[in-house]
Amino acid sequence: MKPTTHQECKAAYLNATEQNLRIENLSIEDAIGPISFALMCHRDRYKSFDVEPYDARNVLCFGTGQLAGSKLYGFHRLIFAARSPLWNGFFISSMGGAALPLYHAGVDYVAVEGRSEDYLIAAIKGAGDGTIESRFEEISEQDIMDIFQGYEGKRGWYALQQYTYEKFNEMFLGENKYMDFRILTVGPASLNTNFGAIGSTVIRHGKFRLGVDDWAGRGGMGSL
């Protein structure tokens, strides 16, 4: 008989089509980590291996393992997984240190599903009572290209990150103190190639730490 632990993990499904958030509690046996969660989504639920990588069923999954938040080295990495638009098969990419804000939000895994007519910026925030708040904002391709050309003295990926920060930072401010949060953004290569990366600058006390950037660059996950 298969042993059970009665432990649960929490998955958040960001639906770009409906612009809503759905939360699901999973047993640890169903998804012991971010890779097993992504495999469950792609193999069993969305059947992404039957379609092309740019199909809406190729959900972008990311998450953290059960040891995130501990003092052990290497367990704070944010793991991304999906069908790679570059290699076509199931692919894994990781981002150093970026898992902690997701852990603090009370979410283990995220799946970005569906497609929006315009480009979409989404945010999730965990509350003390265990609920998860979400917010969505559409942005046109022309506006994104204009931002890439230059915004607040920055260009490319850094410019879009700055724009996103200004739109959403107050969501993570409470009692004159910022929560631990991250912004995951892409650059111009994600719009024009199949090898776009996902990047994130460390934020401390509501300010970017200059030069402290993390990247999930393998497999073209940023192009999805």
Image (spheres, grey):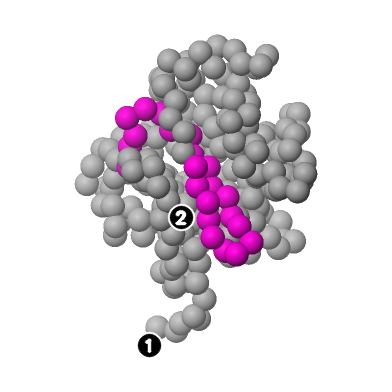
State the residue at coordinates (53%, 56%): 132
Q: Which residues are magenta?
A: 114-135
Asked if residue 114 lies left or right of residue 158, the reply is: left
Q: Position of residue 80 (x, y in %)?
A: 49, 46
Q: Secondary structure at mark 1?
A: loop
Q: Which amino acid does the dot numbered 1 rest on?
A: Met
Q: Position of residue 195 (x, y in %)?
A: 44, 28
Q: Farthest residue to the bottom: give it.
A: 1
> Which mark lies nearer to you, 1 or 2?
2
Dot 1 corresponds to which residue?
A: 1
Q: Secondary structure at mark 2?
A: strand
63, 135: nearer the viewer? 135
In the picture shown, does residue 42 fall above or below 224? below
Q: Position of residue 68 (x, y in %)?
A: 64, 60
Dot 2 corresponds to which residue?
A: 12
Is residue 126 covered in magenta?
Answer: yes
Q: Are marks 1 and 2 in contact (CB under 8 Å)?
A: no
The quadrant in which residue 213 appears is top right
State the residue at coordinates (44%, 59%): 23
**Disc 1 residue crowd, few under 14, some 14–19, many 20+, Cα 10 Å:** few
